[in-house]
Image (tube, coloured by chain):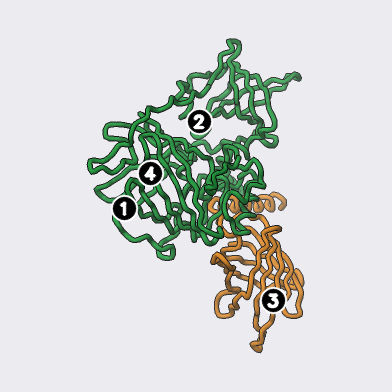
Amino acid sequence: MRTRKFLLASLVACFFAVASGFAQEGHPLKGTWSGDWGPTADQRNHLTFVLNWDGKNVTGVINPGPNSFPIKSVVLDPVNWTVRIEADAKDPAGNAVPIVAQGTLEDLESYHRTITGTWRQGATQGNFRLTRD
Amino acid sequence: MKTRPLAVLALLMLIASAPLSAQLSFTATYDTERKVTLRGTVTRIEWVNPHAFFFINVTDSSNIVTNWALEFGNILDLERSGWSEESLAIGDVVAVEGVPARGPARQAYARSITRAPSGERLFVVTPRPAPRAEPAPRWPDGKVRLGPAPGKKGYWGTASAVGLVENTGTPIPMNADAILDNISDVDRVAPFQPWAKALYERRQRRLLRDDPMARCVPPGGPRQFHTPHGIQMVEQREVNRILVLLGGGNRNWRLIHTDGRPVGQAAEVVPTFYGTSVGRWEGDTLVVETVGFNDKFWFTSGGLPHTELLHLTERISRPDLNTLRYDVTVDDAGAYSRPWTGGWTLQWVPDEEIQEYFCEENAESTFDR
């Protein structure tokens, strides 16, 4: 079982090594990101972010498709590579629910760089993790 | 038993991923703050591009034998200086002074190689003789030629600068890998946007070890004009285009259309490593506009970032036979606060052809020893 886990981990590592050969080298937030957020390890909500950089602002959408909602603002602080994301989700009644996510961009050189941090959606606090696809 | 297919797959993927960590910059590979002196017996010679290696068995005072990998230059430079694979033989005893690799690898860059017991210095690269001053060759209609004159050979060799910086009149000290001597000079390099400046600084502090070109990704943009082992410019006037053939990097090529077509808009073309180039002549200067770059490469040595908004205006001229003047205006509103211009010259290498050189051939340049 241990060997199997080790081999699986090796496979994943090799996959990332192959993928990193074509990493995106421009603005580090640009791209499609996926991950989840939630108040606990068991209560998770899938996230897909599509972010773009127009030279002045990071724009984008969360969960593209019929239930998407636009991102209000993304602020990248390149001094320590922290990211603040604000958006408005909607509750079942269609009311806006503000989202504030604060995270840190890590593993910048990898195609599969990550953002991890805290996530507040309305009154619910949790954490999130996004990995660039 | 079930783990066997997994193990085979993992091994295959490991092999596939190995070339991706192929050609790091000198500074990222070797620790120039340290020196190593070795004496041993040659066990293997790798006379391949881009870096030639030989291997020696070194016996220490406890009679323990270890094998060292010693990089000793590029075979194109070595062959031009009269050396060959036969200049060293397996079983020869050599003394080596060099720069050790970073980390625990038993690898070094050999700065001095001496055969024992004769004391003969090996693999010394001689500089090219200074070329004769001559006017630039021209086509029958009087236009300057960017390649060799009819019946002649030659190509564009070493660039006068290792990295692209904004023309300010004051040189910025940097090493041969375009790593700044003083990181506080970063604001003099280019008018960065904050994120681009931070990314450039990060790449510099990491000694460029994340350089995509180290994984054989093409050197698009100005970088092709200071890639080791030169370029050739082939003017195909009958089809209104100019090919830029790269001697180093990944030995690929770029196309410049000179048929009067409009400059493409980035949104209309598939972003690529070399973009879409349209050239026109202004007197003796070829002016090339290029858009449509992807953002999967570093467009110059040293790690300057760019985005897909990158628009280059290159001005290429040949004031005499031996000099190619290359100036480029970088207009990338995604990474820089304003357009800026830099450039350098390239030296003509007469009577020689670009030789075969493939980035991938010596993927094992960092040996796990």
Instruction: Give the Cα separation between the discs numbered 3 and 1.
Output: 52 Å
Which residue lies under the disc numbered 2?
Answer: B74
Determine whether the residue tagged by mark 1 lies in a helix, strand or loop.
loop
Chain B is shown in which shade? green
Within 10 Å of disc 1 (Cα), the crowding (few <14, some 14-19, many 20+) is many
Determine whether the residue tagged by mark 3 lies in a helix, strand or loop.
strand
Q: Are marks 3 and 2 in contact (CB under 8 Å)?
A: no
Q: Tag 4: residue type?
A: Ser
Q: Chain of mark 1?
A: B
Work out which residue is located at the far bottom of the displayed protein and give it: A93
Which residue lies under the disc numbered 3?
Answer: A99
Q: Tag 1: residue type?
A: Thr
Tag of residue B347? none
Q: Residue at x 40, y 65 (%)?
A: B268
Q: Tag 3: residue type?
A: Ile
Against B173, residue B41 (above or below) is: above
Instruction: Give the Cα separation between the discs numbered 3 and 2.
Output: 56 Å
Which one is nearer the viewer's eye here, B313 or B177?
B313
Against A23, residue B359 (above or below) is: above
Q: Tag 2: residue type?
A: Asn
Determine whether the residue tagged by mark 2 lies in a helix, strand or loop.
loop
Is B336 on the left-hand or right-hand side of A96? left
Q: Residue at x 43, y 62 (%)?
A: B266
Which residue lies under the disc numbered 1?
Answer: B258
Which residue lies under the disc numbered 4?
Answer: B317
Determine whether the residue tagged by mark 4 lies in a helix, strand or loop.
strand
